[in-house]
Image (cartoon, rainbow, N blue to C red):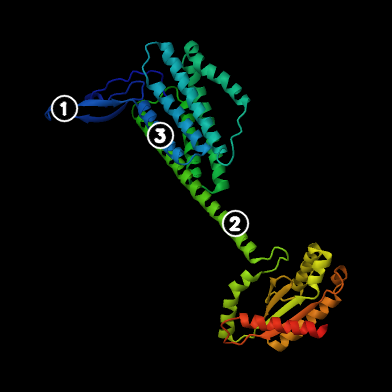
Amino acid sequence: MSGSPRGDAPRIRLEAAGAAAPYNWGVLIAAIPTAAPSTTATATLVNPRLLASAETLVIATLLLLLYLYRRKPYILWWIWGWCALSAAFFLAAQSWRSVKLEAMAFGGAQFLRILAGLTFVIAADAYRRSPRLRHGYGLLLLPVAIWFGLAPAALGTRSVFAPGYFLTAGAMAAAGVAHGLLARQSRLLGASLVGVMLVLFAGLNVWAATLPGVPEGTAASGTLMVMLMIFLLTGLGMQLMTFEDMTYELRHTNARLEAARGKLREAAITDALTGMRNRRFFDEVIGRELQRHRRYRTPLSLVFIDIDHFKAINDTLGHETGDRVLREVASFLLRHIREADYVFRWGGDEFLVLISCGEGEAIRRARELQEAFAKSPQLGTLPKGVALSIGCVEVPPDTGDIMPLVQAADERMYLDKKRRR
């Protein structure tokens, strides 16, 4: 967090560490003996702004490495946000010879922190879609940038001290809420962590804005530790959110591949013209049906169906009329055959039904099917002479090869066709 524009860090000896610290964010890190144990220890002073600048830069670098592997716009906006924060802390940590330059640097740091919060808002918006950026946004930021860049030189740092912290708090709170809403929609734990940490950072800025000056002594150390911990957890949340997004995308891709595979399989086992199952599907299910037939001794029969005069219809009226006849017959069969049974388009004008009953029952149902088709209203829309010929055969329990039985049903169908003619 940027503090006082004063960049010269005071030097504190170990024996004076208990005294009141001056108006700065200096942190006493360690006291290391340089010679014998009796030698006076010296204190190492670390500028907390430089420490915060280094941490935010490391987070930006890690996200950049992640972006090189997974090029997503929201990661890039995160990187810009952390780079802006790093530049803000680095700018405020420098010592300037001129008081005006020091004040302007502090104002610039405050503006960069506001800009960082806004980029985090854009990052949340860029997660699922392209961010909606307009030229008007830049025009709104222009007077803010001018104020934070020039006002400190003329009016002092107090002109941008509280406004900078309050505006930063607003931007960070908006970014936190945006990531929270994203977590609610996408159920990403990383987005939840980022949202909570950004809101906490916003609260820290509100607290800093209400102070008469930058915290001193142990308060500075405690504030620094809280801020660095917030940054660390925010960066971890962003990393987690990215890996969760990768997992989500993999699941989504797998689901699409599974759906595409299902469609391909459906297309492979379905006759495109009639919409009923084809011989490929018959090859898939017949082994399972025969095994169940042997194990449970359930009755099983084949019904072979052929359309009368179909070749003549194709030759005289054309293939379009023939296709219409096939579709109408297939629609009739699908409506009148039980869902527990299978009906296949065997080829040309031939259909095969795998029905769970004995041969006598299969013949009775096939005759009823013939009569129902002869009386169906849709027959009036078809060419004259269209009718169904059938042949039935029962499947013995010890059947291993079904094709001889299909051939037998086919032969009985031709006998039925001759008989009816």
Q: From the top left corner, tell me how far across and down residue 349 is, in percent.
A: 74, 72
Q: Report the quarter where the C terminus lies.
A: bottom right
Q: Residue 260 carries which label?
A: 2
* Labels 2 and 3: the sequence-earlier one: 3
Verify CB contact (< 8 Å) between mark 2 and mark 3. no
Q: Which residue is drawn at 62% across and 82% down?
A: 404
Q: Which of marks 2 and 1 is in front?
A: 2
Report which residue position mark 3 lands on: 61
The residue under label 3 is which amino acid type? Thr
Q: Distance between the residues labelled 2 and 1?
A: 72 Å
Label 2 sits on what residue type? Ala
Q: Residue furthest front?
A: 315
Q: Where is residue 385 in the image (x, y as percent from the top left)?
A: 85, 74
Give the mark nearer the N terminus: 3 vs 1: 1
Is disc 3 placed on a helix, strand or loop? helix
Q: Within 10 Å of the Cα at label 3, are there few (<14), some (14-19), or many (20+) other Cα atoms? A: some
**In terms of sequence position, does the residue under pointer 2 or pointer 1 come before the other?**
1
Mark 1 is surrounded, within 10 Å at the Cα level, by few (under 14), some (14 to 19) or many (20 or more) other residues, namely: few
- Per the rendering, the mark at residue 34 is 1
